[in-house]
Amino acid sequence: MVKVLSYEDFQTVPVVDMDEMTPYLQVSESDGKSFPLPGEEFHFIRLDLSLALIRHPAHTFFLRVTHETLGSDGYENGHIAIVEQQSTPRHRDVIVANYEGSFIICRLLIQEEQYSIQTDEETSTIEPDMEFAIWGVVKDMLIPK
């Protein structure tokens, strides 16, 4: 099953100026048990990660990996792929494709004018009569905690 995530599923995170960082964290004096939040005593901006990671927002989507077809390359169940539909796929790119009625993450192999896809289990040559469509190129991977 493929679950497409929207930009709103990701929160912005604080960015602290390097000049304002300290090399240590002090224990909070109020309860003696917890550390202060990093950067809480500093003025900081908020960075929208989608602006930092995504070149073409109108042609990009997030895809949660549910099948480990490329687990050996780090594309594991629960990881979130950033997929760009505007990119031209090249030899050895990781892509999202509709292959024989199922969506998969695989590696695209192009040799002369012959296309093949590679997963952990096998390499399959794409024949003209096969159902195959490239939906996008995986540009980056987010690994949730």
Image: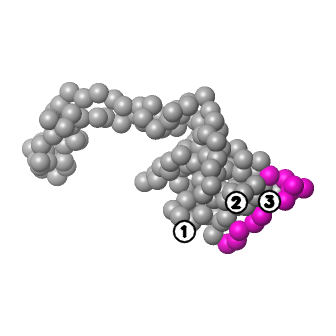
- Overall secondary structure of the magenta section: loop
Amino acid type, residue under disc 3 in the picture: Ile
Region of the chain picked out in magenta, as a range: 121-132
Amino acid type, residue under disc 1 in the picture: Ser
Task: Choose the circle earlier in sequence order: 1 or 2.
Answer: 1
Residue 122, how many percent across, how many down? 70, 71
Residue carrying label 1 = 72
Point 22% across, 41% down: residue: 38
Residue carrying label 3 = 126
Point 46% across, 53% down: residue: 143
Q: Nearer the viewer, mark 1 or mark 3?
A: 3
Cα–Cα gap, marks 3 and 2? 12 Å
Compared with 47, 34 (above or below) is below
Q: Residue furthest bottom?
A: 121
Residue 46, how many percent across, how many down? 33, 29
Q: Which mark is residue 27?
A: none
* Residue 126 is covered by the magenta coloring: yes
Point 45% across, 31% down: residue: 51
The one of 43 and 72 positioned closer to us in this rendering? 72
- For label 3, count other residues whose C-alpha is less than 10 Å away and answer few (under 14), some (14-19) or many (20+): some
Residue 95, how many percent across, how many down? 64, 51
Does dot 3 land on a helix, a strand or a loop? loop
Q: Does any portion of residue 102 appear in the rendered image?
A: no
Q: Which mark is residue 111?
A: 2
Task: Choose the circle earlier in sequence order: 3 or 2.
Answer: 2
Cα–Cα gap, marks 1 and 2? 23 Å
Amino acid type, residue under disc 2 in the picture: Gln
Does dot 1 land on a helix, a strand or a loop? helix
